[in-house]
Image: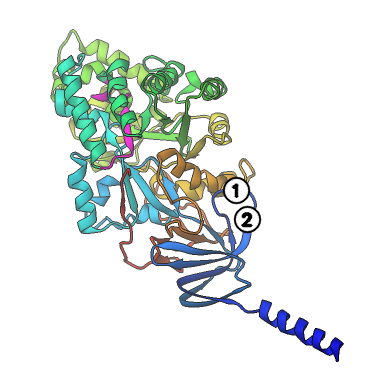
Amino acid sequence: MKHKIIILLILFLGLGSCKKDRMEVDILIKNGTVYNGVDSIPGTLTLGLVGDKIAYVGTGKHMDFSANRIIDAEGMIVSPGFIDPHTHADRELKDPKESHNKPFLFQGVTTVVVGNDGSSDYPLAKYEQMYKSNGVGTNVAFLVGQGTIREKVMGQSDREATDVEILKMMELVQQEMDAGALGMSTGLFYAPGSYASTEEVIALAKVVRQNHGIYDTHLRDEGAYSIGLVAAVKEAIEIGVKADLPVHISHIKCLGKQVWKQSDSLITIIEEAQKKGVRVTANQYPYEASATGLKAAVVPRWAESGGKDSLFTRYGDVKLKPHILEEVKANIEQRGGPENLLIVNADHKEFEGKTLQEIAQDMGLDANEAVFEILDKGYARVASFSMAPYDIKNFMKQDWVVTSSDGNTGHPRKYGTFPRKYKEYVKSGVINFADYIKGSTSRTADILGIPQRGTIQEGYYADVIIFDPETFGDKADYQDPFQLSEGLQYSIINGKISVEKGTYNGQLNGRTIKKE
């Protein structure tokens, strides 16, 4: 009898231990291979989303779920939504017809940063409210542009700022930080930001530091245009040291044959600074061609001081014209020559899809002279094939380099960056899968100071993507840069589905993210 009681007790306890906890969720994701953005080894895990948060992450074995929606992700990759730290998506987000942000959405991007390269919408509070009112397809975070602030105070003038002007710029930076900017961006290669001295930038960066923001920089030189690439990186580090704030180098690269393979030196310089306590990181896009305005690419800064009208006045001066053309010719060669400069977007549509060399031949002019004929007809954007695979891969392998698109009209990176990196560099073994995910999610969130995003973790915001590892890839190229990427099955932003079974459902589930 005693033995029977013991057996019954064991059976009773065993049945009790099998009792499952009940949980109601809005969306249940099961059977997927989950990369949480932190760990190197994925797991076959179940995710439960409630409202805009991740409420459950686990095996699901001891849970009894009641779900409004179940997504079976078998054979798929489940990841935190990608965060793109360098975009120009604000140009479309202001347009209600384009605010879906599909070029980024179909890459798996759920958060974009705008206000890069020293150029931001102003005032931030106005545009942040616009995005809230109109709705946006992805989350949006902001930087305040140093070039924009300088132009508000000093216009396009190429001169040293006075103490009074610097104080006014500092006040405007504080205003934009109060409005929620994550930090300040510079475009020290571009006018009017390029007219600022290092000391002027440090003064503004100190305001950012007081607000616990970051310093994001398009370097003063990415090749051999002015002070040189190495000196430009050292300047960025100097600003970080003297202003005592984190430095983030945007779209790090070695632009032009003169600086190919300098990535080894730059990595050493940056890692030496890191050892001394300077927080230096970078982002990168996985393409061999850069893209920028034709004027910015080849026209000397001194010649364009004051704007386009001033440029053409100087170009018409018989004394200055030869010097301008000489420098333009040298800059064209640094970009790989006129045969490697492709017009990807232009007000005068007949130029699009042609190289500078082809346009010059059609005009019967030298390439440097053809530049001014093109600019006279309006804006033109150019892609220059001037980066070496060695440097691209070298930077990509560093754990302090994350993925960005620098997405802008006419270059395929706007539509293809994150899937391309997976297809070209993960599948070939240049970087591993887990590092690819980390460098697209948690590391980026940490660099930018964005809380509770970039990681699949209970209590974090439910920005989750599901993609097919066999088909995830880019379709955009330089001949047709407007093709959406493929292979994304689901995009869930703030707990709501935006892409379902590879199709956008028209929902604007993004939010504005501000510095807290």
| Residue extending farthest bottom | 1
Task: Estimate the x, y position of residue 82 in percent, counting from the top left.
Answer: 45, 51
Question: Mark 2 sits on what residue?
Answer: 42
| Between discs 1 and 2, the one toward the N terminus | 2
SS class, disc 2: loop
Does the magenta run of residues contain 115? no
Above or below, 260 against 54 in this view is above
Can the viewer see residue 146? yes
Segment colored magenta: 180-194
Determine the secondary structure under disc 1. Answer: helix
Residue 189, picture quadrant: top left
Task: Determine contact: label 1, label 2, CB under 8 Å.
Answer: yes
- Side (left or right) of 178 relative to 486: left
Point out residue 172 in the picture as x, y percentages from the top left corner.
19, 31
The residue positioned 55% from the left and 33% from the top of the image is: 389
Rendered residue at 47%/76% (across/down): 67
Q: Is residue 184 magenta?
A: yes
**Can you tell which mark lies on residue 123?**
none
Q: Amino acid at mark 2?
A: Pro
Residue under pointer 1: 434
